[in-house]
Amino acid sequence: MWRGSFRCTVVTMLVATAAGEAQPPLSGVGGLTVADHRVDAGFGVERTMGPVVSAGMTLDLRSRLWLVLHARAGSLSARSSGAIDRDFGEVALTAQWRATPWLAAEAGAAARSYSSVVGRQRWILVRTGGEIRVPLAWGGSVGVFRLGYLPVVAVSGLETPRLAFAAGAGMEYRRGRACLRAAYELERYDFPLAGATRRLEQLSAVSVSLSLRLRRAS
């Protein structure tokens, strides 16, 4: 049910944007990520790791307001005893307000799933945060630093985390209509005590992506 509602929201926003008189600039992006998922539920760290492919689009709505839609999917293989191979999937929608060329605020939501032979775990995430961009020594390159807080995290079969945050750092290089980006990202979830055990969960990723501006402002 939640997946159908999320898809309807995404489609409605994109159709409404496309129907406007002035067509906003549109960029397409694709990337490859190596994801590292770790869970410690009191019996040692269970680790899975593997490649994740991503694709998406960015709409520049009002010069400073950006709408980003992306999807990613991949397979994570067990890398420790007790871990189980699983498939990973996510769809996310983020709005970003660029207050200045070097500072932006953002908010968004994501639907995520981990699927294995023992079942499927579904996540709903709401994120808020900011991004700082620092020009580097050579032209067209910037350093990017991100920090976010997740005020809403709903996980099937688990209680709400006591604390959830995200952080990342990377570099972008722009040339013409293309932008190459390399980044490291980390998400951390601290769940409340269940008896004498506390569940800690972490998702980290090293990614490389390429975006290309497909349409200019009319």
Image (spheres, rainbow, N blue to C red):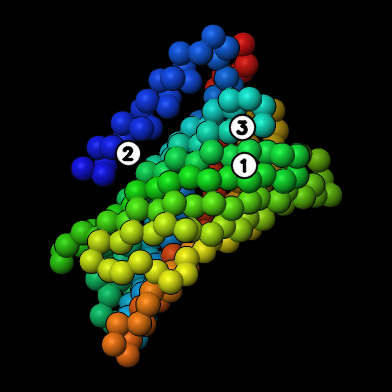
Residue on which disc 3 sits: 65
Q: CA distance from mark 1 to mark 3?
A: 21 Å
| Residue type at tag 3 | Leu
Which secondary structure lies at badge 2? Answer: helix
Measured as percent of width and height from the top left, residue 168 is found at 59, 59
User: Would residue 43 appear left or right of 54 to someone viewing this image?
Assistant: left
Contact, CB < 8 Å: mark 1 with mark 3?
no
Contact, CB < 8 Å: mark 2 with mark 3?
no
Decide which of tag 1 and tag 3 comes sooner along the chain: 3
The quadrant in which the C terminus is found is top right
Q: Residue furthest left?
A: 118
Which secondary structure lies at badge 1? Answer: strand
Contact, CB < 8 Å: mark 2 with mark 1?
no
* Disc assigned to residue 59: none
Task: Give the residue drawn at x 75%, y 44%.
Answer: 102
Residue 72 appears in view: no
Which secondary structure lies at badge 3? Answer: strand
Q: CA distance from mark 2 to mark 1?
A: 29 Å
Residue on which disc 2 sits: 6
Measured as percent of width and height from the top left, residue 93 is found at 45, 40
Residue on which disc 1 sits: 180
- How packed mark 3 is, by other alpha carbons closer than 10 Å (few <14, some 14-19, many 20 or more), is some
Measured as percent of width and height from the top left, residue 26 is found at 54, 24
Decide which of tag 2 and tag 3 comes sooner along the chain: 2
Task: Give the residue drawn at x 67%, y 32%.
Answer: 64
| Residue type at tag 1 | Leu
